[in-house]
Amino acid sequence: MNTTHPRTSLTARSRRHLAALAVTGIVMTGALTACAEHDDHSGPDTTTSVTTDGSPSGTVSGLLSGADSPADGGGLTAPSTHGGHDGSSNGS
Amino acid sequence: MNATATWDDWSCRVRVTVTRPQALPAAKQHLVALMAEVALAADRFSPHSGLSRINDGAGRLVPVSRRTVELVDVALEAARRSDGTVDPTVGAHLVAAGYDRDIADLRDRHVTPTVVEGAPLPTWTAVQVDHTLLRVGVPTGMALDLGATAKAWTVDTAARTIARACGTAVLVEIGGDLAVSGDVTTPWQVTVAERPSSLGGRAAQRLGLVHGGLATSTTTARRWRTPAGDAHHVIDPRTGRPADGPWRTATVWAATALQANTASTAAIVLGDAAVDVLERQHVAARLVDHGGRVHTVGDWPSDAEAA
């Protein structure tokens, strides 16, 4: 015979659910912290940013690590004729 | 379809745009966390920040966080690379000019600047950094301000981190400093303007951004009134006073937002000499003079090309 009160069973399930959520939160926070710590000690990074608009000269590379990166040009183009707005550089 | 989150912080508009919409919540979380960390290290208006403790402890070495030391190093490197034109030891002169509180509380108010008799001119080489014990010291009478380089460093770092951690191309923007990271198939669509309110105005320009960073420095946004006329926040280290050159706004593209911000700030300070210096640095720039006329440097697309 099942002697567990339905309310007690529900409460127990809620507690397990909350515990699972707490663990998830800790894991996520840890992941965020780990990412941040990794970046604290990360050295120069090389990333290739590629954009193609059909022209052979559309492939560029840029170093994003900091002060030692050369300004290699080619970072700006005319705006798209299709519009759109992803960001702004406004004085502040 | 890109996804964007915008909000206000650091008295600025903050934006993060990602090419993978599912990554937006995590991307925003990364940026919010990083900005909180940087504020704890470098907020001049928080008495508990590492920066404030350095300034309050002028004359001795003050223990601070690793992040604070890192941001001081970034600012000193910018000073070195700009031959002192962008100097973080302008803190005391900013306060003397009237910028002694958050700009939201200062803008469009009348302030009587103080005259700091005998105060040393900004001298970045006088800053001491102990990397072993994590201590920073400035001479008595001197104060640090990391507002420019810390913001640009934050967008660069956030863009790089988010792209790697969240698996998305990303654009990060904080108050005029903008950095992108990750692979894109079409350029990011961005607008350059003197102030957010002038986005649709004559001095605004739309562009495509392939990679790197953008920064806009202007004397038109952070301004306040004094008996001698309007003052602004871009201090000329050579005089200790707000810069008084021909450019009211400078936007620079460079490989990183930090490089771009250093160059845009230097352009305001250098005035007439800015064009030659920017050309030697091989950066692209857009300068606006006090009459609203636009001058471009390097590979900056003309308004005709961008139209």
Image: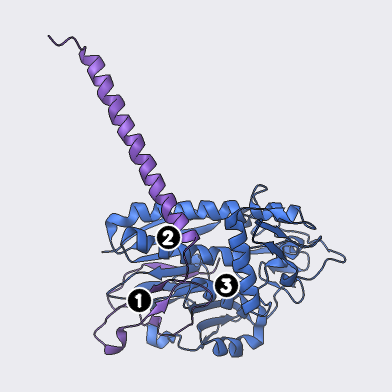
Q: Specify the chain shown as blue.
A: B
Q: Give, as a three-letter code, the residue at label 2.
A: Arg
Category of crowding for the residue at label 1, using alpha-carbon neighbours closer than 10 angstroms: few (below 14), some (14–19), many (at least 20): some
Q: Quadrant of residue A76?
A: bottom left
Kindly identify which numbered label has been placed on residue B159. none
The tally of labels here is 3
Category of crowding for the residue at label 2, using alpha-carbon neighbours closer than 10 angstroms: few (below 14), some (14–19), many (at least 20): many
Query: With respect to residue B265, does B63 lie above or below?
Result: above
Residue carrying label 3: B217
Q: Give, as a three-letter code, the residue at label 3.
A: Ser
Category of crowding for the residue at label 3, using alpha-carbon neighbours closer than 10 angstroms: few (below 14), some (14–19), many (at least 20): many
- The answer, for residue B7, to whether it is visible in the render is no
Instruction: Describe residue B137's horizontal placement relative to residue B189 as left or right.
Output: right
Query: With respect to residue B137, does A22 lie above or below?
Result: above
Residue carrying label 1: A48
Colour in which chain A is drawn: purple
CA–CA distance in space, label 2 to label 1: 23 Å
CA–CA distance in space, label 1 to label 3: 27 Å
Kindly report which numbered mark, 2 or 1, lies closer to the viewer in this rendering: 1
State the residue at coordinates (60%, 87%).
Answer: B277
